[in-house]
Image (cartoon, rainbow, N blue to C red):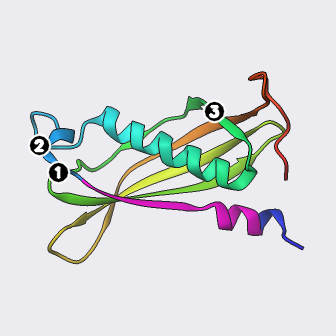
Amino acid sequence: MTTIEDKIKKAETRVFKAVFPNTVNHYDTLFGGTAMHMMDEVAFIAATRFSRQRMVTVSSDKIDFTVPIPAGTIVELVAHIVHLGTTSMKVQVDIYIEQMYAEGREKAISGTFTLVAIDEHKKPTKIIK
């Protein structure tokens, strides 16, 4: 039998992206809004993989931008479920930077997103665990 912990582990989602010039600001670093867009998308995927239900984002908690993400780097977004409620869940998303031509990686951004399961009438519904 699959436990909740096993389902949470299986729902962890990792996405890699390259930071291209069209996604950076005048400082040659990733736009904050672009980073948040990517984080929300990965949070949605992790929540959907866990529940296999319709999920919508209802809030994002504090998002910490601790290291700028320069153009020409690779980023890895890692999403994992950190809390399950009756109709909602919290998904932690971290973005790590990797230089394209050097070893090593560093956490750059971290935030939490709350998503809610909805029914066919767009009303909150219980998350199937």
- The answer to whether the residues at label 2 and label 3 have Cβ atoms under 8 Å apart is no
Q: Residue furthest right?
A: 1
At mark 2, the secondary structure is loop
Residue 56 shows which numbered tag? 3
Using the image, determine if residue 124 lies above or below residue 117. Answer: above
Q: Identify the residue under disc 2.
A: 28
At mark 3, the secondary structure is strand
Which of the two discs, 2 and 3, sits closer to the camera?
A: 3
Q: Nearer the viewer, residue 69 or 128?
A: 128
Q: Is residue 55 left or right of 68 when viewed as pictured? A: right
Q: Identify the residue under disc 1.
A: 70
**Label 2, residues with CA under 10 Å away: few <14, some 14-19, many ≥20:** some
Q: Amino acid at mark 3?
A: Val
Tell me which numbered mark, 1 or 2, is placed earlier along the sequence.
Answer: 2
Tell me which numbered mark, 3 or 1, is placed earlier along the sequence.
Answer: 3
Q: Is residue 12 left or right of 77 when viewed as pictured? A: right
Q: Residue furthest bottom?
A: 103
Q: Which residues are magenta?
A: 6-18
Q: Nearer the viewer, residue 83 or 37?
A: 37
- The residue depicted at 23 percent of the width and 42 percent of the height is 30
- The answer to whether the residues at label 1 and label 2 have Cβ atoms under 8 Å apart is yes
**Label 1, residues with CA under 10 Å away: few <14, some 14-19, many ≥20:** many
| The stretch drawn in magenta includes residue 16 | yes
Using the image, determine if residue 42 lies above or below residue 116. Answer: below
Quadrant where the N terminus is found in the figure = bottom right
| C-alpha distance separating marks 3 and 1 | 30 Å
Using the image, determine if residue 102 lies above or below residue 111. Answer: below
